[in-house]
Amino acid sequence: MSSKRIMSGMRPTGRLHLGHYFGALSNWIKFQGQYQSFFSIVDWHALTTKFQNTREVEPNIWEIALDWLCVGIDPEVATVYVQSAVPEIAELHLLLSMFTPHNWVEREPTLKDMVKMLDSDESAAKEKVTYGLLGYPVLMASDILTFKGELVPVGKDQESHLEFARDVARRFNNFYNVDFFPEPKPEFTTTPLLKGVDGQKMGKSFNNDIKIADTEEDTIAKVKKAITDRTRIAKSDPGHTNLCEVPWPLYQIFASDKALLEKVKVDCESAAIGCVDCKVQLAGLINEYFRPMREKRKALASDPDQVRKIIEHGNLKARKVASQTLHDVREIMGMINW
């Protein structure tokens, strides 16, 4: 295993869906065997836009922990922790904010994206921006730098999100004439574009997602609603897989047998199978893929003490690393470690 550290996290906003799995978790599972991995449930980040619903955070932490563990995030290999259980992150956030220019924060793309989540009306959204949300980019940088993360898994369209953390690391190093914080680099991941059943981007807020933890019956019901080829009116009409908005891209992910994929294509384009039957078959493939994970999730959910011990152990491991980083930062800054 490489000595390099990789860091990533997710906001606890509810159960995870296929987009989270194929866009992030499947890559984390690969990386945890290659690098020293730190995976955080970033609950403080959730508060920046969900401060009126704080009671939802704790149950959502539980849901994410179950999802992570059931898909294969290994707490014996990776450090899995809750952000708020590592107070050193908050102190580093405070210290880094002291010398981070205000205009750096305002031009940060991540902040702009977060503001849009507050209200569809731009002027109304700006009125809802809190001090905590304004500091979101610095907190995100602190998440990475607390663990001296050298790599962060991102898609190519997200590289700009890391620029802020690099700028902060560079400014600290230059200001104190040290080579302390590594400048985090992107570990590019290939993320398939997954649409929700309505053809929009898959997301919990759109109520169009297929969740990792869905029952098999729920999965079938959701897939049956998926948008297909809008030009195909009758079952006897030939279909066009290139126009099939949701099921065909999912078939390309879940049909590991190329012969099956080709058969689906031929059957669709020759009208040998209707869209409903085709979607039921797809739901079967999805259920088959996630069945072992869902069974593991049920077992974990039935033993909350075990899950709590796993998270508490991860929190302790994370604090050990974070405490050393903060101790060193305070010494570099000339502050006494009381």
Image (spheres, helix red, strand yellow):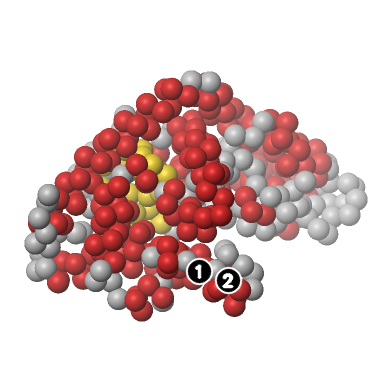
Quote the CA–CA distance across marks 1 and 2: 7 Å
User: Left or right: 59 with respect to 42?
Assistant: right
Q: Can residue 151 be seen in this view?
A: no
Q: Residue at image x 31%, y 54%? A: 90
- Residue 115 percent across, percent down from the top left: 52, 68
Q: Nearer the viewer, residue 330 or 20?
A: 330
Q: Alpha-carbon neighbours of circle 2 within 10 Å: few (<14), some, or many (≥20)? A: some
Residue linked to disc 2: 125
Callout 1 touching callout 2 (CB < 8 Å): yes
User: Left or right: 12 with respect to 274?
Assistant: left
Q: Alpha-carbon neighbours of circle 1 within 10 Å: few (<14), some, or many (≥20)? A: some
Q: Residue at image x 28%, y 71%? A: 100
Q: Residue at image x 84%, y 55%? A: 232
Quarter of the image for residue 134 reads bottom left
Q: Give residue 100's mark.
A: none
Please tell me whether residue 278 is drawn above or below residue 327 in the rendered image: above
Q: Which of 239 and 214 is in front in this view?
A: 214
- Residue 93 percent across, percent down from the top left: 30, 59
Quarter of the image for residue 257 reads top right
Residue linked to disc 1: 129
Secondary structure under the numbered disc 1 in the rendered image? loop
